[in-house]
């Protein structure tokens, strides 16, 4: 009987892989055309003579409350020059990044046929890492100075658990995160489970729209951190269930298990020291994956389901 069960799951895996391969071939044929507009370089080369032309091309990047003299002074500011030069050095042509962005747009078009290819504009933001990417229906803004490499001198003083993701391979991941927010519907987040499922939806969205990225890259972990999370699923789940945390509205829980942090706060010294932050997001991801595996539901439909519905119908069992 055990051998039959193993064979059954192997057959399911083979069929699923063939289906996924067919879908990916279809997606790869979707035409996507756009140019990457290097506003970071354009602004860095601005002068009194050509500033008016630049403002006409990018009016949304110039606040009207500032005069031309302000913008010229900014161009010539020492820090701004350093940001512009570093961005140009790390991203001389942006070819590899454009390939990944094209793949993201192809997947978005496949799953959301109404998707229209936006303008893609690179800029600098004085290392505003809370807004690394801004996405609207018509424009994507990418702050290149937040992707210069985790050990770049500009990031001294920023905590390592944040700067470890200030790398070029995270650009398309951050874009996928912002696009996911446009498609998730969930009522007010009250319980830990609500938070877990919300971020689980974000991560499952990434499974489909950036399948060329690793699980570690999707959640912003190192490989060692994702391996720890996978190896300790059972213990994490047992902890959540035994302490009745899933349906708790304790306001301290998001900071302990959801929000970016150097580690998750189980309040057990040895585990805290070894664990990555955001472990609640990781567990929510596994619940959403289980739900999608065990239910015939489209991704669009799932994104509108409430947390309890997804959890109750997921048949989730942590890895042993």
Image: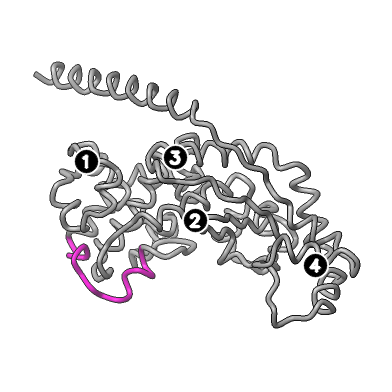
The Cα atoms of the two marked residues, 3 and 1, are separated by 19 Å
Quadrant of res 79: bottom right
Q: Which residues are magenta?
A: 242-257
- Spatial CA distance of label 2 from label 4 is 29 Å
Residue 47 in the image: state x and y as whole percent: 89, 66
Residue 195, horizontal then vertical, whole percent:
30, 63
Exactly how many numbered labels are in the figure? 4
**Residue under numbered circle 2:** 137
The quarter of the picture where the C terminus appears is: top left
Q: Main secondary structure of the magenta part?
A: loop
Q: Which residue lies at the image location 64% right of the left edge and 47% below the top edge? A: 168
User: Where does label 4 land, which residue?
Assistant: 80
Alpha-carbon span between mark 4 and mark 3: 36 Å
Label pair 2/4, CB-CB below 8 angstroms: no
Mark 3 in CB contact with mark 2 (< 8 angstroms): no
- Residue 289 visible to the viewer: yes
Mark closest to the chain's N terminus, 2 or 4: 4
Give yes or no for residue 241 being in the magenta stretch: no
**Tag nearer the camera, 3 or 1:** 3
Secondary structure under the numbered disc 4 in the rendered image: helix
Q: Which mark is residue 109?
A: 3
Badge 3 or badge 1: first in the primary sequence: 3
Q: From the viewer's side, name the closer residue of 224 and 307.
A: 307
| N-term mark: 3 or 2 | 3
Graded by Cα atoms within 10 Å as few (under 14), some (14 to 19) or many (20 or more), the crowding at tag 3 reads some
Q: Position of residue 236 (x, y in %)?
A: 28, 53
- Secondary element type, mark 3: helix
Eyeballing the image, is 296 above or below 89? above
**What's the mark number on residue 297?**
1
Within 10 Å of disc 4 (Cα), the crowding (few <14, some 14-19, many 20+) is: some
């Amino acid at each position: 009987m055990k051998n039959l069960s193993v064979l059954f799951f192997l057959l399911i895996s083979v069929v699923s892989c063939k289906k996924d391969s067919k879908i990916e071939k279809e997606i790869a044929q979707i035409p996507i055309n756009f140019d990457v507009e290097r506003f970071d370089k354009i602004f860095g080369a601005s002068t009194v003579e050509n500033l008016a032309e630049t403002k006409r091309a990018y009016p949304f990047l110039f606040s009207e409350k500032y005069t031309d003299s302000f913008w010229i002074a900014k161009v010539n500011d020492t820090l701004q020059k350093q940001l512009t030069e570093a961005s140009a050095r790390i991203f001389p042509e942006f070819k590899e990044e454009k390939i990944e962005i094209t793949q993201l747009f192809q997947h978005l078009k496949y799953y959301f046929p109404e998707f229209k290819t936006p303008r893609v504009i690179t800029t600098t933001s004085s290392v505003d890492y809370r807004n690394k990417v801004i996405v609207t229906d018509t424009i994507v803004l990418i702050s290149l100075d937040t992707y210069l490499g985790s050990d770049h001198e500009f990031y001294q003083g920023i905590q390592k658990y944040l700067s470890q993701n200030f790398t070029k391979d995270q650009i398309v991941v951050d874009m996928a995160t912002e696009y996911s927010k446009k498609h998730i519907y969930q009522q007010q987040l009250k319980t830990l489970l609500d938070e877990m499922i919300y971020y689980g939806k974000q991560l499952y969205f990434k499974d489909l729209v950036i399948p060329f990225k690793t699980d570690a890259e999707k959640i912003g972990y190192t490989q060692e951190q994702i391996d720890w999370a996978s190896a300790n699923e059972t213990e994490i789940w047992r902890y959540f269930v035994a302490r009745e945390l899933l349906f708790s509205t304790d306001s301290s829980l998001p900071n302990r298990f959801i929000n970016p942090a150097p580690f998750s706060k189980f309040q057990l010294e040895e585990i805290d020291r070894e664990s990555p932050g955001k472990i609640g997001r990781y567990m929510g991801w596994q619940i959403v994956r289980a739900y999608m595996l065990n239910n015939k539901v489209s991704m669009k439909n799932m994104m509108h389901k409430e947390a309890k519905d997804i959890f109750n119908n997921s048949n989730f069992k942590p890895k042993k």
